[in-house]
Each structure stands twice: as structure tokens, then as C-alpha cells.
Amino acid sequence: MTDTPSFRSDMTVELIKHSASDTDVLWAARVSTAGEQSLDELSKDPERSRGLLNFLMRDRHGSPFEHNSMTFFISAPIFVFREFHRHRVGWSYNEESGRYRQLEPVFYLPGEDRKLVQQGRPGKYEFVPGTPEQHALVAKTMEESYRQSYAAYQEMLAAGVAREVARAALPVGLYSSMYATCNARSLMHFLGLRTKDERSQVPSFPQREIEMVAELMERAWAELMPLTHAAFNANGRVAP
Ligand SMILES: Cc1cc2nc3c(=O)[nH]c(=O)nc-3n(C[C@H](O)[C@H](O)[C@H](O)COP(=O)(O)OP(=O)(O)OC[C@H]3O[C@@H](n4cnc5c(N)ncnc54)[C@H](O)[C@@H]3O)c2cc1C
């Protein structure tokens, strides 16, 4: 563990464990008509399978998309996790503790491509690029503030103050880490709200940083369940 603050602009998303494939949706759906033979049906007709996935997505028959599991390791700033943990249904979380360990001084700085200036009304903001001066100001001010608050945290720890008390001095730009487990249905609901995409039937205006996490999660999921992912996109990116 280092006491020297470091700064990053990226997010970490690692798919560490999964049991998730398009066929998991198919056998769950086909029990309706094939009973215990539903597993045998899988390899029969790929075109029918694609059609069934599309039908389930379009008509919002959601439960067959729940018979799978993905566990992600995610490292992101605390303000991202505050938004993330609002997703209650079909998610399990475990996050590192600021009570049981000293928090590491890793802090978020917006990257050069992060649009800095907000325009428009609440719920329909547009973001436009910042000037070089605004970027320089953000980097300088945040770094100074992060260094100061981490020094204050360390000072209190050195004086014997409990970690759970001293952490109150730390900002929401501090990186945290967690495991998040979900299924395809809960992930689609999350993606529908936390990504901006032209194919979305219901547009959302997510904060860029949680969208960065969502994009990495979507990439991993699309490799596991390509047909389900395609049906999600084809049906307006609305979770069934
Ligand atoms: C762009 C954006 C801006 C936001 N701004 C704010 C904000 O300013 N302030 C703020 O507090 N939050 C804000 N949120 C968070 C938002 O209100 C939701 O809490 C979050 O998106 C999780 O969505 P959810 O409740 O649908 O998900 P989940 O909690 O995963 O729930 C999934 C679904 O289960 C059902 N459900 C879950 N719980 C209940 C329940 N108790 N009763 C009935 N049905 C239930 C609903 O159908 C729900 O859609 C924002 C979210 C987004 C995407």
C-alpha cells in the first residue's frame, strides 16, 4: 500500500465468473411448450432460437433471461458506486470497507475526452467539450483537493482516530472496488438506464463515468450472449 496519491481517468471492469449463454434463455423459455424435453430442443433449429429470443424480448417475457449469472469486479470512483447501488433488483454487491482497511489514495480525474460543460435543462442535458483552460483548472483543483483530504485522513489515522471516522474527510472521487453479480435481465435494465445509445426506444442521460463502466460490462456480456444482446438492441434496448 502506498501513501502517495495517484490519479486515473479510466474504470476497471473484469468479468471474473459467469454461467451465461443464449441457450440458458432458450431452455428456460421452452419448458413452456416442451416440458422436460426443453433441453433437447436447443440444437435443433438456430433460426427458430433467434426468433424465440426476439419474441421474448419484444413481448417482454422477462423471466427466461434470469437463468444465468455474471460476476464482475469493478473499480470506479465512489460517486459511480452511489449511482450503481440504486439498482436493487437482480443484483448482489460486496464492496471494500472503509472501516476495516485503510483506503488507498487513488483518485479520479476526468480524462481529456470527458466533456466538461453542461447545457440544457435537468433531465435533458447536453455536454460540450471544455476549453484547455477548464481542463487545466479541473486537473489542478481536483489534485490539490485530493492531496489535502488524503493528508487530513492520514493525519487522523496517525493520531489514533478510527478509520470509520477519519474516512469522512475523503471525497467521492476516491476509487472503491466491488463485486457485482447480476443476470442478463437485470444487466439489460441497468444498460437501458446507464448508457446512451441511438437504438434506445427510451433515451436516458446517464453520467458519463457510470456509462463508461456500463459500456465495459456490455462488451463482456455481448460476448457471452450474442443473440440476446442483438435482440436487446433490435428491440429498443428495453429490458424485457
Ligand atoms: C439518468 C438518471 C438520473 C437519475 N437521477 C436521480 C436523481 O436525481 N435522484 C435519485 O434519487 N435517483 C436518480 N436516479 C436513480 C433512479 O431513480 C433509479 O433509482 C435507478 O435508475 C435504478 O432504477 P430502478 O429502480 O428501475 O432499478 P432497480 O432498483 O434495479 O429496480 C428494477 C425494477 O424493479 C421494480 N421495482 C424495484 N423496486 C420497486 C419498488 N420498491 N416498488 C415498485 N417497483 C419496484 C421497478 O419496475 C424497477 O424498474 C437516476 C437514474 C438515471 C438513470
Image (cartoon, helix red, strand yellow):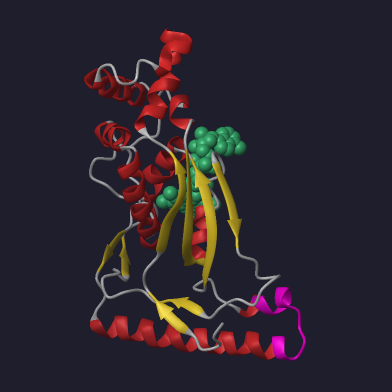
Q: Quadrant of the C terminus?
A: top left
Q: Is residue 158 found inside the magenta-colored segment of the image? A: yes
What main secondary structure does the magenta stretch of the protein show?
A: helix
Q: How many marks?
A: 0
What is the quadrant of residue 158 in the picture? bottom right
Say whether residue 168 is left or right of residue 3: right
Residue at the spot 47% in from the left edge and 35% down from the top edge: 68
Say whether residue 180 is left or right of residue 129: right
The residue segment tinted magenta is 157-167
What is the quadrant of residue 193 in the picture? top left
121 relative to 235, above or below: below
Residue in the foreground of this view, choosing between 192 and 99: 99
235 relative to 133, above or below: above
Q: Is residue 122 found inside the magenta-colored segment of the image? A: no
Residue at the spot 60% in from the left edge and 55% down from the top edge: 94
Q: Quadrant of the N terminus?
A: bottom right
Say whether residue 143 is left or right of residue 96: left
Residue in the foreground of this view, choosing between 69 and 126: 69
What is the quadrant of residue 131 in the picture? bottom left
